Image (cartoon, helix red, strand yellow):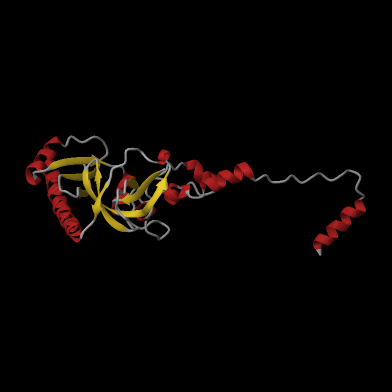
Amino acid sequence: MVKVVGVRFKPAGKIYYFDPADFDIPQNSYVIVETIRGLEYGKAVISQREVKEEEVVLPLKQVIRIATEHDLIQMEANEKKEQEAKEVCQDKIEEHQLPMKLVDVEYTFDGSKVIFYFTAEGRVDFRELVKDLAAVFRTRIELRQIGVRDEAKMLGGIGGCGRVLCCASFLGDFEPVSIRMAKEQNLSLNPTKISGICGRLMCCLKYESDTYECNKRCVKIPEIPPLPDDIPIECLEECSKEKDV
């Protein structure tokens, strides 16, 4: 068994396991952890517990410390810089006339890298854009192309059901969704009825899919046995009268 704590870096992001070291980390507290991108600020959504070694990828990165007030101030400063960086990048995209849509900007906690998320129909040659951004921000620049489902998750919105998008509120990972799931649930196959605001099949089609699969495998409708040929006609007439009553 391995002792872990589950940390999330975004409100509806994926949960990553870290080694809590010697810290006593209560649920919903904020921590500074070591990641492949450097130091990051995250929320401990799963308190300390032991899990099987097969459930984690070893070796685990460690929790560096429980977040302090100074760390919170730095996070707020990063968020302010992200808004400024978004405006600068958008101006540069228009200047270079690139066929891409800027979705979001993210600073790593220590400010060593700025990540720009964008969508585009195909591949985009953004080498000159990266040079311009590096000259402005004087730090490492990464441009990351994302899909329309990730765009909806980042921007959020209201679904056809009237609720906040599942992907933006609680779904950590996207699961495969197919048109077969809609057919099994006897839903309309009209694309406007079963597609989310991202234009892809709604994630909620997956929620009841397992139940329908189980019913298909496990529930057998009993067959009605045929009536014997030698039942008197008077009995059949009597049964018919009772049903009418």
Q: Which quarter of the figure is the C terminus placed in?
A: bottom right
Q: Which quarter of the figure is the N terminus placed in?
A: top left
Left or right, residue 238 beside residue 128: right
Left or right, residue 5 beside residue 126: right
Residue at 88% across / 58% down in the picture?
238
Indicate the quadrant where residue 80 lies: bottom left
Left or right, residue 93 beside residue 163: left
Q: Position of residue 6 (x, y in %)?
A: 35, 50
Indicate the quadrant where residue 29 lies: bottom left
Q: Position of residue 49 (x, y in %)?
A: 40, 50
Q: Residue furthest bottom?
A: 245
Looking at the image, which is closer to me, 239 or 78?
78
Looking at the image, which is closer to me, 97 or 126?
126
Residue at 34% across / 53% down in the picture?
12
Looking at the image, which is closer to me, 49 or 10?
49
Q: Is residue 109 visible?
A: yes
Q: Position of residue 163 (x, y in %)?
A: 40, 60
Residue at 43% across / 58% down in the picture?
161
Residue at 18% across / 40% down in the picture?
142
